[in-house]
């Protein structure tokens, strides 16, 4: 296993090593009623339990002036492999959102749920409630394999079932083994004489987070090439035959640090459904043994692969598996967005995909969407699917229930997808302010307004019905996968963004930064000019990103640093 170099070790390695398989002093920290925070090392350890200590950045300065400590609370992330959950689970999560969090449910870009604003005293009750609903939060964050994604695609129900089973099997196989989670949150006694072990991860877990996705072509909604490890399903007559294997994708970067960058995964071969779990374990252990444990900014698998190369990876894989995966098979993707509205599957059931702007479900004066989804969950007999684009599918609806669901959808203004522009339907923003400690600019709270202004431009150029992907993040970490959008806006400072253009509509080509640190006026004037060119010069059926690449329009734009 790779070991931190003496004198260069990153402190997180020590914290993991000293945590005794993720216990740290978390139990004592939770017990301490004198403060709403937890001990510094426990902040790191608690991430593996699906929890982030945060503070409300909207009031941070004001409180500092008034000599008050920050307004602390916790973000809790519930893991939902493949994004599939039952109506009973939805109701349980809704209750946590309304009783202990900030009255909103946040659907994430990895098909999971987030709660914001949970106080320390309510953490245990919330996490127990999540577990009672048969979901959990372990490994939702931390240096382990995260929530495994899977194209929801209910309309191909037979194929989806097989791929989803593979995704769940990998998720279960790579879930940490430690009993710390059950002891701390569920008050389960450690069985006397037992010793914890992590056969896959070891005592210091992975050098960094690790992410896996399963795509079912022609949908690339999971952005499979953005993942450390990906599986692209191949099929014959609707029956799963196997998976193309992709490795070394990732989005995160740091402004001004060229040694960090988004990277698209390489396709390295093909495997049968039976081989998926052992291949996942092999790749995870290669990263465990060879990932960079000194520099966390350089510790993702994409950098391990860049350092050692694909030939090395194939040798490592063969040594661990005892065989070489077969050659990759052809596949075609058509888009990385969602397809809204009702669809029927081969088994006669119906599925309704609803737009959920930036994944936030809350009740507002305009629409009672959180209440609406709760009422739907009360009568729904199928399941829910969170999409990788922060939207939700009411899946497996009996024909007899369709009208009742439609009534609730209309009553609670959940049917906005009917009126919205294609741009908005293909938009995503990360959480950013006020909860995310890393954010440099707004995202979730700002993108809806900005989109209104961009929509005016599209109207002007008669492009409102043109699907264009647009994604915004408050910093370069890439949580809304902005580098895979035809238009990417990456936060640089309050009100200022880097503009990236030219990714492929199907998520198979990264965009490029064309303007740095620009404000809203410059974003709009730049897009205005390019939309005009696109309208006049595009070829039949040509997507916006492809047009920019063909005409090199994006690349001709001068890089300007207005900072
Ligand atoms: Fe993320 C850190 C939110 C998907 C790359 N991400 C964070 C934190 C926890 C901030 C922090 O470090 O304290 C954010 C919490 C904000 C808040 O207040 O809720 C956060 N990430 C999110 C979510 C909720 C965005 C969203 O709007 O949906 C997504 C939760 C996914 C989930 O359910 O597990 C989320 N994050 C992603 C993705 C997209 C993906 O995985 O498909 C990425 C890019 C893909 C990748 O990992 O390469 C992503 N998040 C990061 C990074 C950069 C990692 C890197 O390699 O450099 C960080 C920072 C870090 O890890 O140090 C980060
Ligand atoms: Fe926070 Fe940056 Fe992720 Fe947005 S991209 S949620 S600002 S870490």
Image (cartoon, rainbow, N blue to C red):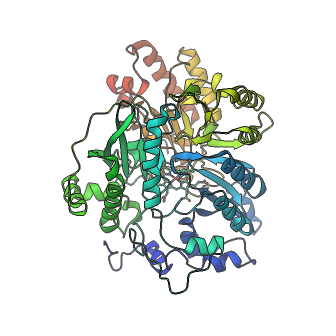
Query: Looking at the rendering, in which quadrant would you find the N terminus?
Result: bottom left
Q: Residue at x 71, y 58 (%)?
A: 117
Is residue 359 placed above or below 116 in the rendered structure?
above
The reply to whether residue 265 is in sight is yes
Spot occupied by residue 115 in the image (x, y as percentages of width and height): 66, 54
Spot occupied by residue 171 in the image (x, y as percentages of width and height): 46, 56
Spot occupied by residue 440 in the image (x, y as percentages of width and height): 56, 51
Spot occupied by residue 7 in the image (x, y as percentages of width and height): 35, 79
State the residue in front, 10 or 236: 236
The reply to whether residue 70 is in sight is no
Q: Residue furthest right?
A: 365
Q: Is residue 443 left or right of residue 165?
A: right
How many marks the image carries: the answer is: 0
State the residue in front, 17 or 442: 17
State the residue in front, 242 or 526: 242
Q: Is residue 372 left or right of residue 328?
A: right
Q: Residue furthest bottom?
A: 193
Is residue 521 placed above or below 473 in the rendered structure?
above
Q: Quadrant of residue 259?
A: bottom left
Q: Residue at x 30, y 59 (%)?
A: 304
């Amino acid at each position: 296993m790779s070991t931190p170099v003496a004198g260069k070790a990153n402190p997180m390695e020590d914290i993991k090593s000293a945590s005794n398989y993720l216990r740290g002093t978390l139990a004592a920290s939770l017990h301490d009623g004198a403060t709403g925070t937890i001990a510094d090392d426990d902040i790191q350890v608690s991430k593996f339990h699906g929890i982030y200590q945060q503070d409300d950045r909207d009031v941070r300065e004001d409180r500092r002036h008034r000599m008050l400590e920050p307004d602390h609370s916790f973000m809790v992330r519930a893991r939902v492999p493949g994004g599939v959950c039952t109506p009973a689970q939805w109701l349980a999560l809704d209750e946590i959102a309304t009783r202990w969090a900030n009255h909103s449910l946040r659907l994430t870009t990895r098909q999971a749920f987030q709660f914001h604003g949970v106080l320390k005293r309510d953490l245990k009750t919330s996490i127990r409630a999540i577990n009672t609903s048969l979901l959990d939060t372990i490994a939702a964050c931390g240096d382990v394999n995260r929530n495994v994604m899977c194209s929801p695609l209910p309309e191909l129900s037979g194929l989806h079932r097989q791929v989803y089973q593979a995704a769940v099997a990998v998720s279960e196989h790579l879930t940490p083994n430690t009993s710390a989670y059950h002891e701390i949150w569920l008050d389960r006694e450690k069985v006397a004489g037992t010793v914890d072990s992590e056969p896959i991860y070891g005592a210091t877990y992975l050098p960094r987070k690790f992410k896996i996705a399963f795509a079912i072509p022609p949908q690339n909604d999971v952005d499979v090439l953005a993942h450390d490890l990906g599986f692209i399903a191949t099929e014959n007559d609707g029956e799963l035959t196997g998976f193309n294997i992709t490795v070394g994708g990732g989005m995160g970067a740091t402004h001004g640090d060229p040694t960090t960058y988004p990277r698209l995964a390489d396709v390295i071969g093909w495997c049968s459904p039976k081989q998926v779990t052992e291949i996942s374990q092999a790749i995870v252990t290669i990263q465990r043994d060879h990932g960079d444990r000194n520099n966390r900014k350089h510790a993702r698998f994409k950098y391990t692969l860049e350092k050692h190369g694909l030939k090395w990876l194939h040798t490592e894989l063969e040594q661990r598996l005892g065989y070489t995966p077969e050659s990759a098979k052809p596949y075609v993707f058509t888009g990385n967005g969602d397809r809204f509205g009702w669809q029927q599957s081969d088994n006669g059931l119906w599925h309704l995909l609803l737009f959920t702007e930036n994944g936030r479900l809350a009740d507002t004066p305009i629409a009672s969407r959180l209440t609406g989804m709760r009422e739907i969950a009360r009568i729904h007999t199928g399941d829910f699917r969170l999409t990788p684009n922060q939207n939700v599918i009411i899946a497996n609806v009996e024909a007899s229930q369709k009208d009742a669901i439609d009534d609730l959808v209309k009553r609670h203004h959940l049917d906005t997808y009917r009126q919205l522009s294609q741009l908005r339907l293909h938009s995503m923003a990360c959480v950013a302010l006020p909860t995310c400690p890393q954010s440099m600019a707004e995202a979730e709270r700002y993108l809806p307004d900005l989109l209104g202004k961009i929509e005016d431009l599209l109207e002007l150029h008669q492009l409102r019905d043109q699907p264009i992907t647009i994604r915004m993040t408050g910093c370069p970490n890439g949580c809304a996968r902005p580098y895979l959008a035809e238009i990417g806006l990456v936060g640089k400072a309050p009100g200022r963004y880097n503009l990236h253009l030219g990714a492929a509509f199907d998520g198979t080509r990264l965009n490029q930064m064309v303007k740095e640190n620009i404000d809203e006026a410059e974003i709009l004037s730049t897009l205005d000019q390019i939309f005009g060119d696109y309208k006049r010069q595009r070829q039949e059926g040509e997507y916006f990103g492809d047009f920019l690449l063909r005409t090199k329009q994006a690349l001709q734009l001068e890089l300007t640093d207005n900072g």
